[in-house]
């Protein structure tokens, strides 16, 4: 029964993501969505009424060498984000947000718009992003974009 719930959420969400210009990478374990200019996203159905959207960027040596500065950077991201939670774990800056409630086209569209703003514009305007995040990430994401599956 649990698998059936996940698939229903994913189909509605996949359709909405496709409408917004995302493509999907074939993966049997999880749902991965990509769009030019946006970090690669993982879609995680949590319950029948909750979906977690997340991604990550590896951080560089500066973050390891200046952990206090990196944590201050993450705290600043969390204070200024619209709905995304930023954290560090195992060499990566993670960014996740949860959509809770029944799927609604307008509400979900606003959720994704705010999430995209957090993971693009907020990251771009922070000085710490250039200092702590590996600089080649947009190139990596655009290379993976060629792996899309037509679903």
Image (spheres, rainbow, N blue to C red):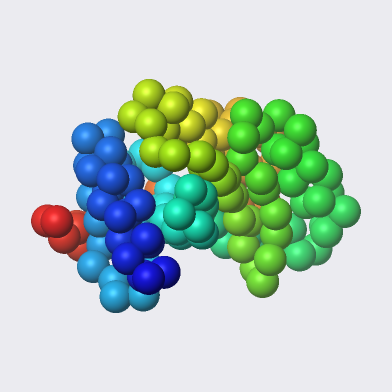
Toward the viewer: 52 or 4? 4
Relative to residue 109, is residue 11 drawn left or right? left
x then y, percent, for residue 116: 46, 35
* Count of marks overlaid on the render: 0
Residue 29 percent across, percent down from the top left:
36, 75
Q: Which residue is found at the position 56% from the left and 34% from the top? A: 118
Nearest the viewer among 11 and 148 is: 11
Is residue 9 shown to the viewer in this render?
Answer: yes
69 relative to 107 in the view: left or right: right
Residue 43 placement, left or right of 99: left
At 38% across and 31% down in the image, what residue appears?
104
Q: Taking 69 as reference, is 128 left or right?
A: left
- Residue 144 visible to the viewer: no
The quarter in which the C terminus is drawn is bottom left
**Where does residue 10 sit, x and y in percent of width and height?**
32, 54
Residue reaching furthest to the bottom: 28
Name, please, the residue furthest toward the left: 150
The quadrant of the picture occupied by the N terminus is bottom left
| Residue at x-position 29% and y-position 75% | 28
Question: Residue 149 versus residue 46: which sits nearer the camera?
Answer: 46
| Residue 2 falls in image quadrant | bottom left
Pick out the residue farthest to the front.
1
Note whether 105 is above or below 7 in the view shown: above
Please tell me which residue is depicted at 58% across the width and 50% down the height of the picture. Answer: 96
**Against 136, is 118 above or below?**
above
Residue 20 in picture, x, y percent from top left = 27, 34
């Amino acid at each position: 029964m649990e698998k059936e719930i996940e698939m229903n959420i994913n189909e509605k969400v996949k359709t909405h993501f496709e409408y917004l210009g995302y493509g999907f990478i074939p993966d049997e374990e999880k749902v991965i969505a990509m769009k030019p200019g946006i970090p690669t996203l993982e879609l995680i159905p949590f319950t029948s009424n909750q979906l977690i959207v997340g991604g990550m960027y590896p951080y560089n040596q500066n973050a390891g060498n200046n952990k206090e500065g990196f944590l201050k950077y993450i705290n600043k991201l969390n204070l200024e984000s619209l709905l995304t939670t930023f954290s560090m774990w195992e060499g990566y800056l993670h960014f996740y947000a949860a959509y809770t409630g029944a799927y609604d086209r307008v509400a979900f569209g606003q959720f994704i718009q705010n999430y995209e703003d957090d993971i693009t514009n907020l990251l771009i305007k922070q000085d710490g992003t250039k200092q702590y995040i590996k600089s080649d990430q947009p190139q990596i994401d655009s290379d993976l974009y060629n792996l899309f599956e037509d679903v």
